[in-house]
Image: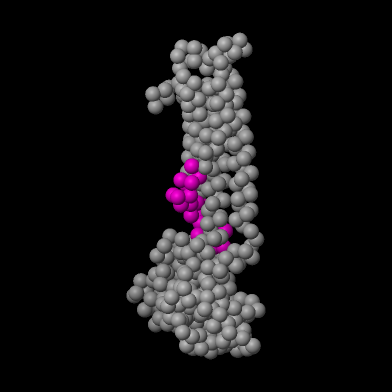
Amino acid sequence: MKYRGLIFANLFRKKFRLLLTIGSFAVALFLFGLLAVVKGAFSQGVDIAGADRLVIINRVSIIQPLPLSYKDRILRIPGVKSITHDNWFGGIYQDERNFFAQFAIDVATQREVFPELVVPEDQWQNFVKDRQGAIAGAQTAKRFGWKVGDRIPIKGTFAPGTWEFNLQGIYHGARRQDDESQFWFQWDYFEERVPDRFKGLVGWYTLRVENPDDAGRIAKAIDQEFSNSPYETRTETEKAFAAGWVKQMGNIQFLILSIGSVVFFTLLLVTGNTMAIAVRERTAELAVLKAVGYSDRFVLLLVLGESLIMAVLGGGVGLLLAKGFTVMVGDPTHGLLPYFYLSLGTMSAGLGLAVAVGAVSGLVPAIGAMRLRVVDALRRV
């Protein structure tokens, strides 16, 4: 930048105003980063849902069970590759605020349906051999300081008593956004201890299909298979199932976009007003620059450059603060939002948005400075 000295001299003319403007960008981009993280946390299940997976729940509600006997009948439907089942446990570890998802899983089929949730082979084999064995997600294990070999007591809710588990393994997601907050234990152990009214029942089924293009046909065939039965089913793709959960919490995306739009519109007005005042204060100086030979284009870029520098500095500080917050604080929801991460792509988008706001807010004052006539400007002094 050949004229960076001139640009920075103008910027630091009013240091307090400069700090306030940069601070406005920083606050706006910090909020943008947090909103993006929350949006990603709510939608991550939808974004990473397997195209070849279907979820089968009771037609009435997911809290209503399905018979274990449905498993073999579903496997006989053409196009079904593999199937597993889960039961929600909902136990309490030490305190009710220590929420994390706990599932009784089908050991024989879990990894066939969810290959992206990776457990070391030796740990998995130890888990299979231990009736009271358990597998924890890496995030949950880190949260509570668990390590392989720990004894973990969890108080049952609908299943009475305290359940003792031996932590035999820790799983990691193959992708960054995979859910690492779950806790698995053996369905056979669950079946032994639950009240008789829960025996022979599962919470839901998840299956993989041979060809994702056949998902719609297979879902329809499954629901037809169990129509008019005491336990009718509702089958949908994993993506649709995850999206349904998000919708139950309201239109999160609309809320976040609304808040973000208001914040950036306000920032646009504040920055535009700041630049207009700065140009008006320097009318005589801009006229002198033109009088000594600097072009209209130079004056335009000079004012626009000041606005863009404030946007980049403030936006960068805000995004770095948001990134630091997600790293240092982690998940403030204590497991309700298992994916709490500000990606580099989101930070780049935020910085681009800050630059756009800086360009738009500085454009009108810059054009006004460019069109300024030397005679008229000096007459105002």
Give coordinates of residue 264: x percent, y percent: 59, 41
Give coordinates of residue 109: x percent, y percent: 43, 80
Q: Reply yes or no: does residue 344 show up in magenta.
A: yes
Closest to the observer: 211 or 178?
Answer: 211
The answer to which quarter of the image holds residue 209 is bottom left
Above or below for 133 versus 37: below
Residue displayed at 56% across by 18% down? 372
Residue displayed at 46% across by 19% down? 295
Q: Reply yes or no: does residue 285 show up in magenta.
A: no
Number of numbered markers: 0
Residue displayed at 45% across by 81% down? 79
Position of 275 with respect to 129 (left or right) is right
Position of 365 with respect to 125 (left or right) is right
> In which quadrant is the N terminus drawn?
top left
Range covered by the magenta-colored residues? 326-352
Residue displayed at 48% across by 29% down? 305
Give coordinates of residue 99: x percent, y percent: 57, 66
